[in-house]
Image (cartoon, helix red, strand yellow):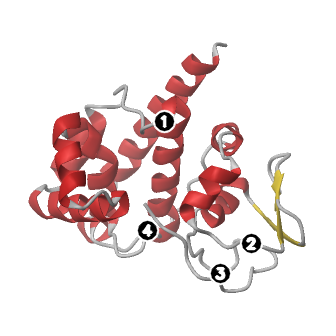
């Protein structure tokens, strides 16, 4: 299968599965915290669906208002949109754009898949839901992570050797830390995982950038 086509299909599948899951959430779960520090479920979905509602020109204006700081812009816009849009409207924004062609700057379709998968895990792991992203989908995300990508998140992984238990994948050298590939992906992105998901538990470190 053509790689771009495969990535596009996985993006659509991930969005569709997330929409189905979100449709079953209780109102209080929409207001529950996620692994994305300071964001509830509604802020995460406001963030992931923002590109579907916002033109490039408006995005550049928002970035200018945030003095060029992408993370600051993402946080401000997510909080604003989460406050003005209902859970039903946020869900509709996702459902209506399952095949939307948005890609992050310089990230291509693989970047779009990474964005959706990571933020989907922010929600499900944060809520304690037993959703496993298909390992082959996580493998596509991990295959696109370079040292530069990982450095963007600012995560301190010195002295750790990440080893997936459900994929033939590893990263780094030092003390082995084993877990499901999706949990290791979250660790790479600077998320603080609930206890018991990694073995052994990595030592506490300064969190990375989250968006």
User: Is the Cβ of the residue at disc 3 closer than 8 Å to that at disc 1?
Assistant: no
- Residue labelled with disc 3: 195
**What SS does tag 4 mark?**
loop
Q: Which image quadrant for residue 206? A: bottom right
Q: Nearer the viewer, mark 3 or mark 1?
A: 1
Q: Which residue is mark 4?
A: 36
Relative image position of residue 156 (x, y in whole percent) = 67, 73
For residue 74, which quarter of the picture?
bottom left
Please report contact status of discs 3 and 2: CB closer than 8 Å, yes or no. no
Between tags 4 and 1, which lies in front?
1
Could you tell whether 20 is left or right of 155 in the image?
A: left
Residue 55 seen anywhere in this rendered image of the structure: no
Whether label 4 touches label 3, CB < 8 Å: no
Q: Position of residue 63 (x, y in %)?
A: 25, 53
Q: Nearer the viewer, residue 31 or 50?
A: 50
Residue at which label 1 appears: 106
Who comes first in sequence, dot 4 or dot 1? 4
Percent of width and height locating residue 150: 63, 57
The correct choice, above or below, for 174 with respect to 121 in the image is below
Residue 24 in view of the camera: yes
């Amino acid at each position: 299968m053509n790689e771009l086509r495969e990535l596009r299909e996985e993006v659509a599948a991930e969005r569709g599965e997330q929409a189905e899951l979100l449709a079953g959430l209780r109102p209080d779960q929409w207001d529950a915290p996620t692994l994305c520090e300071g964001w509830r479920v509604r802020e995460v979905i406001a963030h992931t669906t923002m590109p579907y509602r916002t033109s490039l020109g408006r995005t550049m204006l928002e970035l200018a208002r945030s003095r060029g700081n992408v993370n600051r812009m993402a946080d401000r816009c997510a909080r604003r949109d989460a406050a003005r849009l209902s859970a039903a409207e946020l869900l509709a924004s996702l459902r209506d754009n399952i095949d939307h062609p948005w890609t992050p700057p310089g990230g291509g379709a693989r970047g779009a898949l990474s964005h959706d998968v990571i933020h989907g895990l922010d929600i499900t792991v944060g809520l304690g839901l037993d959703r496993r992203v298909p390992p082959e989908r996580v493998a596509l995300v991990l295959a696109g992570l370079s040292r530069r990508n990982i450095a963007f998140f600012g995560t301190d992984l010195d002295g750790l050797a990440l080893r997936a238990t459900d994929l033939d994948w590893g990263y780094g050298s030092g003390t082995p830390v084993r877990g499901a590939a999706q949990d290791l992906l979250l660790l790479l992105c600077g998320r603080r995982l609930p206890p018991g998901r990694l073995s052994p538990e990595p030592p506490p470190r300064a969190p990375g950038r989250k968006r």
